[in-house]
Amino acid sequence: MKSEHIPKATIGRLAVYIQVLENLLRDGNEVISSERLARACSVNSSQIRKDLAYFGEFGVRGVGYYVQELITSIKQSLGIDRQWKCALIGVGNMGSALLRHHDFEKRGFKICAAFDCDPDKIGLEFEGMEIICPTHLKEQAPELGLEIGIIATPPDRAQRAANHLVEANIRGIINFAPSRINVPKHIPVEYVDFFDHLYSIAFQITLGSD
């Protein structure tokens, strides 16, 4: 990796590149030009070259990119060429949907344990996993090799869920709860808020109608 200071927007575009490249590979495309890849990803070819340059040299002049090699290289650069074991806290509507979303494992992220503080849910089995009280997360994490925490609780319980994850030495957190959490600086947190996207769409529509 050429630089540790990679823009977050670049990481987001790399995720799009992987998705597009995997679709191209499924359709039988073994080689693709930077121009065609750029069109498929809705960016320009110079942007793709700039994004990939953070991680090394890719592509063959006059030929383009070998699709499988590029997928492998991007995944290695992002650290998703292996399986990451995840813990889910909150088995409500959102959490249940995430557990049913089997593409997580296909993309290298396996939800290995589900936690909820509702006594009516503790002990029940869902998608092949027993729902456990979050107070047991600290002992479960090393046994299962858990590294990433996913919070899908109501907003008023998000911080408590984060505290359990921190105590269990979870290395990173995805927060689906519409609430900000406080964790030590060495633990990266990503927020997934659908309202951000809805606000953006509403603004773009409003702007276009003026």
Image (cartoon, helix red, strand yellow):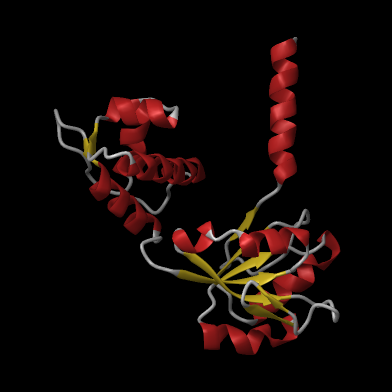
Residue 80's quadrant in the figure?
A: bottom left
Quadrant occupied by the C terminus:
top right
Query: Of residues 16 and 53, which is closer to you in this image?
Result: 16
Give the residue displayed 69% in from the left and 14% down from the top: 208
Above or below residue 200? Residue 181 is: below
163 relative to 156 in the view: left or right: left
Quadrant occupied by the N terminus:
bottom left
201 relative to 102 in the view: left or right: right
Query: Of residues 155 and 4, which is closer to you in this image?
Result: 155
Above or below residue 182? Residue 36 is: above
The image shows residue 60 at horizontal and vertical percentages of 15, 36
The image shows residue 98 at horizontal and vertical percentages of 64, 60
Residue 174 in view (yes/no):
no
Give the residue displayed 38% in from the left and 67% down from the top: 82
Above or below residue 9? Residue 125 is: below
144 relative to 174 in the view: left or right: left
Residue 113 in view (yes/no):
yes
Above or below residue 201? Residue 162 is: below
The image shows residue 165 at horizontal and vertical percentages of 66, 75
Residue 4's quadrant in the figure?
A: bottom left
Residue 21's quadrant in the figure?
A: top left
Give the residue displayed 69% in from the left and 22% down from the top: 204
